[in-house]
Image (cartoon, helix red, strand yellow):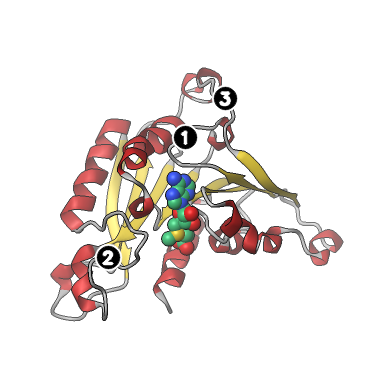
Amino acid sequence: PPLYKQRYQFIKDLVGKYKPKKVADLGCADCTLLWMLKSCSCIEVLAGLDICASVMKEKMHRLSPLPADYLKPSERSLTVTLHHGSVAQKDPCMLGFDLVTCIELIEHLEEPELKKFPEVVFGFMAPSIVVISTPNSEFNSLLPGVMLFRHPDHKFEWNQVQFQSWALETARHYGYSVEFTGVGHPPTGMENVGFCTQIGVFLRKYPQTSESTQSEKPTQAVYKTVFKAVY
Ligand code: SAM
């Protein structure tokens, strides 16, 4: 399967393993991952965030309940919400999530946004699990036609040491552990190149205390809600 499907499947498998109830996808683009996660029966709240409202709106109708959802209501409730805003800004609507996914997002952030990103995601949102994926630049020589970056909108592409040192420092600072994996295997004999997409899975080391959640984090709402569906 194509790489993007492998990344989405990786998240679906992780959801199957940890059974999060509240999942947020940051940089959700056309909401394909959210649409895939809708069928995971453990999930009660799904939220998407993107800085580009038009790409989010393209196919968001797929997130609306179908006639069958009304005819045969399921036991669980499901709320799907889409927000327009930046991961460089805190908004209280992103508090209380169990899993936050950032798939091919960080390489699109300008340096000032990337600097603010860990404080927003790990410091403020502080979910039990964060997944971050990004291209592995060491793999680029194996990809036909890649000159500097894989996509013109990429602000950077990191090699394994660059990603892992950023991830380890972020994890240490915010009290998470991190494990590295990826999708897209290198050819036999070239294993040291690493995965085509590198992935960090961050697990919060300590449970959230009640002070560290909602009540102690007074923040103004800055995101704009562009879609909401209740099943
Ligand atoms: N996660 C999706 C996937 O894996 O298919 C989309 C990845 S796409 C390469 C990167 C997305 O991040 C784009 O939709 C872009 O609009 C969004 N993005 C870029 N900067 C952002 C920011 N500061 N805050 C939120 N989203 C951002």
Q: Is mark 3 on a helix, strand or loop?
A: loop
Q: Is 182 or 136 nearer to us in this picture?
A: 136
Q: Please say whether residue 17 is visible from this viewpoint.
A: no
Q: Which quadrant would residue 31 be assigned to in this image?
A: bottom right
Q: Is 218 or 115 nearer to us in this picture?
A: 115
The percent position of residue 16, horizontal first and vertical second, equals 51, 58
Q: In this picture, is 218 found above or below 202?
A: above
Q: What element carries label 1?
A: loop
Q: Which of marks 3 and 2 is in front?
A: 2
Residue drawn at point x = 59 percent, y = 29 percent: 221
Can you identify the residue that label 3 sits on? 220
Q: Does the residue labelled 2 lie within 8 Å of ligand 1?
A: no
Q: Which quadrant would residue 114 be assigned to in this image?
A: top left
Disc 2 marks which amino acid?
Answer: Phe
Can you identify the residue that label 1 sits on? 89
- The crowding category of the residue bearing disc 2, from other C-alpha atoms within 10 Å (few below 14, some 14 to 19, many at least 20), is some
Disc 3 marks which amino acid?
Answer: Gln
> Alpha carbon of mark 2 to alpha carbon of mark 1: how far?
27 Å
Residue drawn at point x = 27 percent, y = 79 percent: 145
- The crowding category of the residue bearing disc 3, from other C-alpha atoms within 10 Å (few below 14, some 14 to 19, many at least 20), is few
Q: In this picture, is 142 found above or below 206?
A: below
Q: Which of marks 3 and 2 is nearer the N terminus?
A: 2
Can you identify the residue that label 2 sits on? 149
> Alpha carbon of mark 3 to alpha carbon of mark 2: how far?
37 Å
Q: Earlier in the sequence, mark 2 or mark 1?
A: 1
The percent position of residue 225, horizontal first and vertical second, equals 65, 42
Residue drawn at point x = 37 percent, y = 40 percent: 113
Q: Earlier in the sequence, mark 3 or mark 1?
A: 1
In this image, 18 relative to 155: left or right?
right
